[in-house]
C-alpha cells in the first residue's frame, strides 16, 4: 500500500500516513501520552508479557487458578477493551455474577499494574488513543487538521473501539471513505463488528444519505 501511494501521489506522498490502526496509535501516543499520565517511552506488552503480568495479578489477588485461567481472563479483558469497556464499567455490568465480578477485579488490578510499569498492551493502543482524544481537545484538533481526508480499508473488520477512533478523527471535516467486503470478514472472533459495514454504519449521525455510496464490484473471472 505504501508503494502504491508513493507511485500514485509522487511529490508529497511522504506526508501521507499509511499504516494499521495500531501503528498509527503508537505514533500518536509516543507524542502525546503524557496527557494521560504515562511517559513517552512506554512499553508495549506482547502476549508473553501479558501472561507473565497476569500470573503476578493472580498471585496478588489470590485467584483460584482452577476456576480462572490466564488466557481466558485475558481474552475477556481484550473483548471488553474492543468495546471500550473499562474495569469500573465492567464491574458495574457484572452485577451479582460472581465470576464476572472476579474478572472485573482482575481487570482492574491488571490495568493498575500496566500503568505502574508504564506499559500498554496491544488493545490499549487504541483504547488510550481514544481516551487521549476525549480528554485533550488540543491533541484531537491537531490530528483532525492533520488528517482532513481519511480512508479506512477492510472496514468490515473494524471493532467498536476503532469505530470510535475513526469518528473522533473524522468528526471535524467528515471526509471519510471506507472500503470493505462483508463476505471477507475474518476477525469477528477478535471483536470485529460486522454491522459497521452491513448497515454501512459511519460515525456521523447527522449525515445525509447521499453523502456516501455502497459500491458493489462484480467478481472477476479468469
Image (spheres, helix red, strand yellow):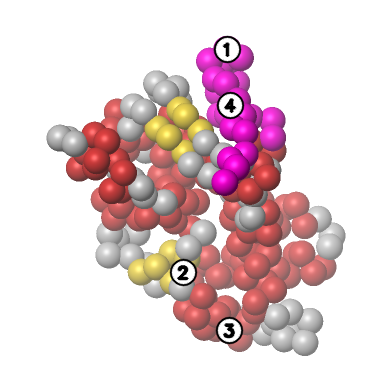
The Cα atoms of the two marked residues, 2 and 4, are separated by 43 Å
- Among the two numbered marks 2 and 3 on one chain, the one whose residue lies closer to the N terminus: 3
Give the secondary structure at mark 2.
helix
- Among the two numbered marks 1 and 4 on one chain, the one whose residue lies closer to the N terminus: 1
Q: Which residue is mark 2?
A: 114
Comparing labels 2 and 4, the label whose residue is closer to the camera: 4
Q: Is residue 201 left or right of residue 172?
A: right
Q: Which residue is mark 3?
A: 55
Q: Which mark is residue 210?
A: 1
Within the image, what quadrant is residue 69 found in?
A: bottom right
Q: Main secondary structure of the magenta part?
A: loop
Q: Position of residue 82 (x, y in %)?
A: 60, 53
The Cα atoms of the two marked residues, 2 and 3, are separated by 13 Å
Q: Residue at x 68, y 59 (%)?
A: 189
Q: Residue at x 29, y 28 (%)?
A: 145
The Cα atoms of the two marked residues, 2 and 1, are separated by 45 Å
* Relative vertical location of residue 179 with respect to residue 39 in this rendering, above or below: above
Q: Which residues are magenta?
A: 198-222
The Cα atoms of the two marked residues, 1 and 4, are separated by 13 Å
Q: Residue furthest left?
A: 11
Q: Which residue is mark 4?
A: 215
Q: Residue at x 44, y 71 (%)?
A: 45
Is-magenta flag for residue 135?
no
Comparing labels 2 and 1, the label whose residue is closer to the camera: 1
Give the secondary structure at mark 4.
loop
Q: Is residue 36 visible?
A: no
- Among the two numbered marks 2 and 1 on one chain, the one whose residue lies closer to the N terminus: 2
Q: Which mark is residue 171?
A: none
Comparing labels 1 and 4, the label whose residue is closer to the camera: 4
Within the image, what quadrant is residue 96 found in?
A: bottom right
The Cα atoms of the two marked residues, 1 and 3, are separated by 52 Å
Comparing labels 3 and 4, the label whose residue is closer to the camera: 4
Amino acid at each position: 500500500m505504501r508503494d502504491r501511494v508513493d507511485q500514485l501521489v509522487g511529490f508529497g506522498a511522504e506526508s501521507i500516513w499509511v499504516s494499521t490502526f495500531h501503528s498509527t496509535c503508537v505514533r500518536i501516543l509516543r507524542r502525546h501520552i503524557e496527557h494521560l499520565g504515562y511517559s513517552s517511552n512506554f512499553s508495549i506488552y506482547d502476549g508473553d508479557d501479558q501472561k507473565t503480568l497476569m500470573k503476578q495479578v493472580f498471585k496478588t489477588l489470590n485467584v483460584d487458578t482452577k476456576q480462572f485461567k490466564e488466557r481466558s481472563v485475558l481474552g475477556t479483558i481484550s473483548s471488553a477493551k474492543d468495546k471500550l469497556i473499562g474495569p469500573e464499567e465492567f464491574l458495574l455490568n457484572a452485577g451479582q455474577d460472581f465470576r464476572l465480578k472476579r474478572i472485573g477485579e482482575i481487570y482492574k488490578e491488571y490495568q493498575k499494574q500496566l500503568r505502574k510499569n508504564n506499559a500498554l498492551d496491544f488493545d490499549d493502543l487504541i483504547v488510550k488513543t481514544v481516551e487521549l482524544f476525549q480528554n485533550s481537545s488540543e491533541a484531537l484538533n491537531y490530528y483532525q487538521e492533520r488528517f482532513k481526508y481519511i480512508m479506512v480499508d477492510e472496514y468490515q473488520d473494524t471493532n467498536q473501539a476503532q469505530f470510535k477512533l475513526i469518528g473522533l478523527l473524522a468528526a471535524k471535516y467528515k471526509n471519510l471513505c471506507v472500503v470493505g467486503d462483508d463476505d471477507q470478514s475474518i476477525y469477528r472472533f477478535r471483536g470485529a463488528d460486522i454491522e459497521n459495514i452491513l448497515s454501512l454504519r459511519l460515525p456521523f449521525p447527522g449525515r445525509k444519505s447521499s453523502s456516501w455510496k455502497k459500491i458493489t464490484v462484480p467478481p472477476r473471472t479468469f
